[in-house]
Image (tube, rainbow, N blue to C red):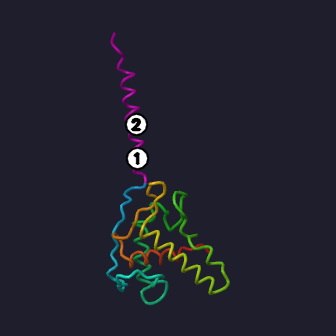
Amino acid sequence: MKTPTRPRTLLRALTALGLAAALASAFAHGDVTPQAVDTSTLPPLGAKWLDANPYSSGPAHKEALRIGTSAYNQNCARCHGLEAISGGISPDLRKFDADCTGLADPAKKAACYKEMDDYYLATVRRGRVRDGRVYMPPFEGTMNQEAIWAIKTYLETRREK
């Protein structure tokens, strides 16, 4: 007895549609390979990693902000959201150091920001892995510290007030 071709064709079409949906879901964030950042217009910071953002103020701030904005959009926005406003997949980076902004004591505020800089630097350099799954790729080796601190400069302008 010959099997009707219509159910087989429908099954093939549904299978193809299912595979297409699975692939689209797998690539929904696009290319998450860290992208290099041109920091040639920033003053070099040297081989030793600094403890705090050297671009938070001073003569290189404006250029670091320009580079950091572009670098954020190339490397961070696909997960953390445009303008650092998360869509819920990853942490909202506007709130990254929110615990520090409300502190009245200048010494406590400075210590809090120092702690947040340490956490930021460790996270961006080494990435985040939980249960063997990469939640954030490591950027050390792809980005130099000038690029990483330039992105932090951009994020500082995005803080929720």
Residue drawn at 38 percent across, 82 percent down: 48
Residue 10: image location, x then y, percent:
39, 27
Q: Name the image quarter holding the N terminus.
A: top left
Residue 17: mark: 2
Mark 2 residue type: Leu
Mark 1 secondary-structure assignment: helix
Q: Indicate the quadrant containing the C terminus: top left, top right, bottom left or bottom right.
A: bottom right
Q: Main secondary structure of the magenta part?
A: helix
Q: How many marks?
A: 2
Q: Does residue 85 sit above or below 2 in this rendering? A: below
Q: Amino acid at mark 1?
A: Ala
Q: Earlier in the sequence, mark 1 or mark 2?
A: 2
According to the picture, the residue beneath numbered tag 1 turns out to be 24
Q: Label 1 vs label 2: CA separation? A: 11 Å
Specify the farthest residue to the front. 131
What residue sits 38% from the left and 41% below the top? 20
Q: Residue 136, located in which quarter of the rendered image?
A: bottom left
The picture quadrant where one finds residue 78 is bottom left
In magenta, the rendered stretch is 1-28
On screen, residue 6 versus residue 53, left or right, reads left
Rendering coords of residue 66 (x, y %): 42, 78
